[in-house]
Image (cartoon, rainbow, N blue to C red):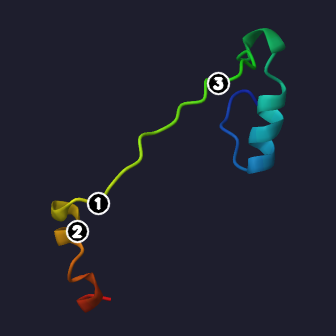
Amino acid sequence: MNAVTEPETLSELIADCALIPATLQAESLPLPRVTAKPWQVDDACQAQVADLDAYV
């Protein structure tokens, strides 16, 4: 690892991240599960794509 320059490859980035002390790493807390509201297509949304087939 070269602490002066930015990593140039993915493997260098992974190696740099592996050297982060555990005291500085985020805790592995479970994230709360959030259920999104079901969505519906309204007339305004449908109108935006009504003629889409003409462009494809």
Q: Name the residue under label 2.
A: 46
Marks 3/1 in contact by CB < 8 Å: the verdict is no
Q: Which residue is drawn at 29% across and 60% down?
A: 41
Dividing the image into 4 quarters, which one contains the N terminus? top right
Q: Residue at x 15, y 62 (%)?
A: 44
Q: How far apart are marks 3 and 1 (CA)?
A: 30 Å
Going from N to C along the chain, the mark reached first, 1 or 2, is: 1
The amino acid pointed to by label 3 is Leu
Q: Which residue is drawn at 22% across and 59% down?
A: 42
From the top left corner, tell me how far across and down residue 6 is, in percent.
Answer: 65, 37
Marks 1/2 in contact by CB < 8 Å: the verdict is yes
The amino acid pointed to by label 1 is Val
Dividing the image into 4 quarters, which one contains the C terminus? bottom left
Going from N to C along the chain, the mark reached first, 2 or 3, is: 3
Vertical order, 39 against 28 (above or below): below
Q: Nearer the viewer, mark 3 or mark 1?
A: 1
- Along the line of sight, which residue is nearer the eye, 51 or 38? 38
Describe the element under mark 2 as helix, strand or loop.
helix
Q: How far apart are marks 1 and 2 (CA)?
A: 6 Å
Q: Name the residue under label 1.
A: 41
Horizontal side of residue 44 vs 8, given as left or right: left
